[in-house]
Image (spheres, grey):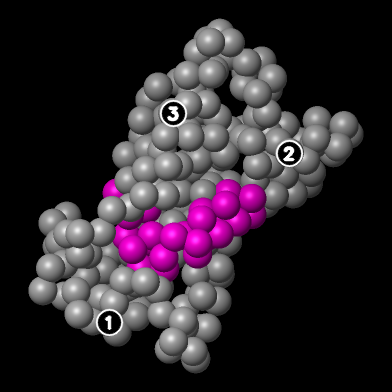
Amino acid sequence: MSKKFIPVLTVVFIALNIIVFFIQISRGDTTDVNVALNLGAAYTPYILENGEWYRIFNSMFIHFGIEHLGGNMIALIAIGQYVEWYFGKVKFVIIYILSGLVGNLLSLGVELITHNYSVSAGASGAISGLFGAMIILAIDPETKHIFSLPRAIVALVLLIVPGLGNSGIDVMAHIGGIIGGFATAYIFYRFRKKHPSSNHPSDFSSDYSSIDRTE
């Protein structure tokens, strides 16, 4: 990554999440389910019975407690800057938002089948999509020496496994996010390969001398 590159939109998303968190604080306990619901956390009965589909979007910016927020924001800055650098700002936003929406929709679909409803919130689905998008960097000949495919797969496994059997983690949102992020990123990748003039703003072929390889 070029040292001159500044992940503006990654920082913007972090700022938005923090701003919403302060709004939660102003409304009460950030771990309070009712506070989260009032701000738009996802809850399948409300979404389907009341037609409150905005919750699928709003819930991506709501967190339960400082640890939940902090963990997600660390992951966002760690991964988001690379995805934004590779795909460019507009595509980065599309990948992030679609990943979160797909994650929440998959979670909703599974709850309809299991009838096990819970209040869900957090940026994890969208961030999982960024992990999915990282697979593209791992298979692109121009960047795979920086992000190897085995490392990308291990990262995805570590992202999913801890949530298995843990009712406090919406694993379906993670899986849906990964699927949404990878699918969207792959479409962008294939289009770029077929239309070279649509390359992302960062010409990484000329930036290799200044790539930051720090892990």
Overall secondary structure of the magenta section? helix
Q: Is any part of residue 7 visible from this angle?
A: yes
Dot 1 alpha-carbon crowd within 10 angstroms: few under 14, some 14 to 19, many 20 or more: few
- Residue toward you, 68 or 214: 214
Dot 2 alpha-carbon crowd within 10 angstroms: few under 14, some 14 to 19, many 20 or more: few
Dot 3 alpha-carbon crowd within 10 angstroms: few under 14, some 14 to 19, many 20 or more: some
Q: Disc 3 vs disc 1: which is toward the camera?
A: 3
Residue 118: image location, x then y, percent: 68, 30
Name above or below for residue 153 compared with residue 38. Answer: below
Q: Which amino acid does label 3 sit on?
A: Ile
Alpha carbon separation for disc pair 2 and 1: 39 Å
Q: Read off the magenta span.
A: 78-102
Q: Does residue 80 appear to the left or right of 104 in the view shown?
A: left
Q: What residue type is labelled 2?
A: Tyr
Alpha carbon separation for disc pair 3 and 2: 20 Å
Mark nearer the N terminus (3 vs 2)? 3
Residue 130 is a magenta residue:
no
Residue at 64% across / 54% down in the picture? Answer: 102
Residue 111: image location, x then y, percent: 73, 42
Residue pointed to by mark 1? 142
Q: Which amino acid does label 1 sit on?
A: Glu
* Disc ID at residue 18: 3
Q: Are marks 3 and 1 in contact (CB under 8 Å)?
A: no
Name above or below for residue 148 compared with residue 23. Answer: below
* Disc ID at residue 28: none
Helix, strand or loop for disc 2: loop
Residue at far left of view: 209
- Residue toward you, 98 or 65: 98
